[in-house]
Amino acid sequence: MSAVTSRPFFLRKKFRMARPEKVAVVEEIRAKLADADATVLTEYRGLTVHEIAALRSALRPTGTEYKVFKNTLARRAVEEAGVAGVTDLLEGPVALAFVKGDAAAAAKALREFAKTNPTLVVKGGLLGDRFVGPADIEALADLPPREVLLAQIAGAFQAPLVKAAGLFQALPRNLAYGVKALIDQRIAAGESAPAAEEAPADTPPTAEVEEAPAAEEAPVAEAAADAPEAAEAVDEAPAEDAPASDESE
């Protein structure tokens, strides 16, 4: 008899090699835990096969895969993945919901299903690699969908900019209203309105300023008028005033 077969049964189990199919299942659970954005552990005691199928259909639009594994294999995968707080939940009929996408939508779908199927119990789970309890998952279900939440955040960032733009546009308008109200108040108190369009006293009239260049140009015009008369005077001069070239010779 060999040394292995001579050992008691409870010691002999440690030396058995893991079956390839079990190794594959453990690796599958580890991969799903790593890829999931969130993982929710639920107790499905009392649910029929038809109800579990209905729950899978309700979770599918949220990007959630609902699977049942043996607790021993799931526990081994969790331990190998180094996830804390989940091992103790793997007792009894437990199924794992692997969420890839909106964790709030998956939590909401689980809560809605549990309203008509109270035998479904949320035990806890993981949000990323952080352990969350049933109360945390319930609070997660109260959040709005991811698209609505992102829109609200974007609106919160844009609101101060819109308010600032409106303030900048209102400043000139409000300033004009304020100046006009101040003027009206001072007029009502007995002061005269400021003559903004009156010219200063020492400024010459516009007509005189325009006529000044014409006065300066007058001598020039008279000189031009006298030029033909001067030319005629030269032409009418007596011929005897010219030198007699023949007599000098």
Image: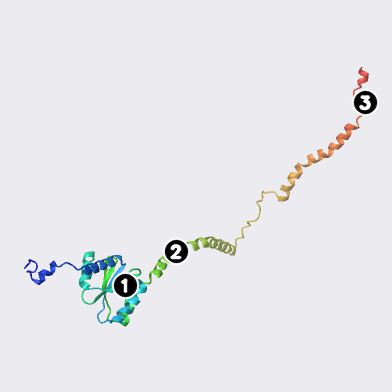
Name the N-terminal-most of marks 2 and 1. Answer: 1
Is tag 3's residue or tag 2's residue first in the polypeptide sequence? 2
Check disc 2 and report its element: helix, strand or loop. Answer: helix
Q: Nearer the viewer, mark 3 or mark 1?
A: 1
For label 2, the residue is: 158
Q: Is residue 24 above or below residue 115?
A: above
> What residue is at 71 percent from the left and 47 percent from the top?
209
Which of the numbered marks, if any, corresponds to residue 234? none
The residue beneath circle 1 is 65
Quarter of the image for residue 42 reads bottom left
Say whether residue 85 is visible: no
Give the class, few, some or many, for how many residues have Cα within 10 Å of label 3's Cα (few <14, many ≥20): few
Residue type at mark 1: give it. Answer: Glu
Q: Nearer the viewer, residue 190 or 45?
A: 45
For the point 50% across and 60% down, which residue is it? Answer: 168
Q: Kindly identify which residue carries mark 3.
A: 240
The residues tagged by marks 3 and 2 sit, at their Cα atoms, a distance apart of: 106 Å
